[in-house]
Amino acid sequence: MIFDTHAHLNFKSFDKDWKEIISKSFNEGVGIVNVGTKYETSQRAVEISEYKENIYAAVGLHPIHIKTDLKITTDKEDGSFSPKGEVFDKERYRELALQENVIAIGETGLDYYYNKKEDVFEEQKKVFKEHLSLASEMDLPVIVHCRKAHDDLIEILSDSRGVIHCFTGKWRQAREYLNKGFYLGFNGIIFKLKLDEIIKKTPLDRILIETDCPYLTPPEAGVERNEPIFVKYVARKIAETKGMEIKEVEKQTALNAKKLFGI
C-alpha cells in the first residue's frame, strides 16, 4: 500500500462521488489522509475516516481561513473561493482530535501569499502556535502549510514533529526543516516548479508523497480534478529524479507515513 498523505475528499468537489473515489483508491492500494482546513472540513474529514480502513483524518484551521479584517479571493489553482473567516477555538478542535482516526493536527501554518499586512501575519503566527500547542498536548504530528513564509515558520517551530506539506521553498530552508526532524511533502507542484535538486538532496526516508486533491493534478492524469490514485505519478517523478525504482519510492514513503502518523 502507498499513501496519499494530503487529500481533501472532504471538499465540495467530491461531494457526489467520494465513496467511489475511496473504493477506487482502495482497489489500487492507496491509503488516504484527509486534511481539514477549517472546522467544517475537519469535521467532514473525521466522518469520512469512518467509512473504510486506511482512511484517516487531520483536523486544523488553514491560515487563509483565519478570521481577519482582510477579504481575499483565492486564485483559480486554489479553487477561486473567498474564505469566510473563522476564529480558532482550540477546545472544539481538541474534541475532534480525540476521535479514533485522527492522526494529525493540520493543516496549519503561515500563508503570506494573499496579504501583506503585518497584523494578519501576527494573527497567523498566534493561531499556528496554538495548533502546535494542541499537537503537543495530544501527542500528534502537525501537517504544515507554508507559502511565502518559510523563514518565519522555521523560527516558530521547536519541538514539534510533522511534515511541511507541498514544499516549495529553497534548499537552505529544506535543510532547516530536515534538521528539526520534519518530513517534506511533495505533490503535483513538482511538475510546475524547479524542485529537482531539492528532491535529489532530500533523503528518501524523509519524503512523503501527496496529491492535495482536488488541486495540483499531475499532467499524466489527463483530467482536471486530482484524485488520490494520481499520487503514483508523484512517486514516479521522484523515482526518476533520484534515479531509483518507483517501487522503492512507494515502499519507503509508505513506511515514512506509517512512522510519522503511527498508522
Image: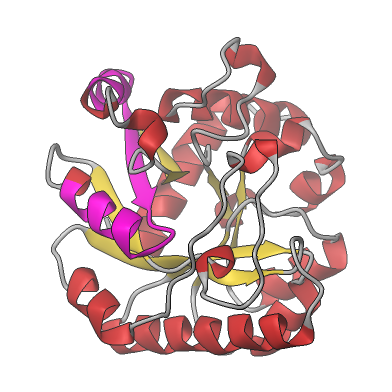
In this orientation, which residue lies closer to the viewer: 86 or 10?
86
In this orientation, which residue lies closer to the viewer: 147 or 177?
147
In this orientation, which residue lies closer to the viewer: 36 or 175?
36
Residue 23 within the segment the image draws in magenta: yes
Judging from the image, the colouring scheme is secondary structure
> Does any portion of residue 163 appear in the rendered image?
no
In this orientation, which residue lies closer to the viewer: 156 or 116?
116
The residue positioned 27% from the left and 51% from the top of the image is 45
The residue positioned 60% from the left and 86% from the top of the image is 123
Q: Is residue 233 above or below residue 123?
A: above
Give the image location of residue 142, x and y in percent: 45, 70
Residue 46 horizontal side relative to residue 211, left or right: left
Residue 59 horizontal side relative to residue 4, left or right: left
Q: Is residue 224 above or below residue 157?
A: above
Residue 238 within the segment the image draws in magenta: no
Give the image location of residue 202, x and y in percent: 72, 54
The residue positioned 78% from the left and 79% from the top of the image is 117
Give the image location of residue 105, x and y in percent: 38, 70
**Considering the image in quadrants, where does the C terminus appear?**
bottom left
Give the image location of residue 41, x and y in percent: 33, 54
Quarter of the figure with residue 112: bottom right
> Does any portion of residue 36 appear in the rendered image?
yes
Quarter of the figure with residue 216: top right
Q: Is residue 125 above or below residue 165?
A: below
The mark total stands at 0
- Our reading of the magenta stretch's main secondary structure is helix
Residue 259 horizontal side relative to residue 16, left or right: right
The residue positioned 64% from the left and 65% from the top of the image is 71
Q: Is residue 62 above or below residue 117?
A: above
Magenta extent: 20-47
**Considering the image in quadrants, where does the N terminus appear?**
top left
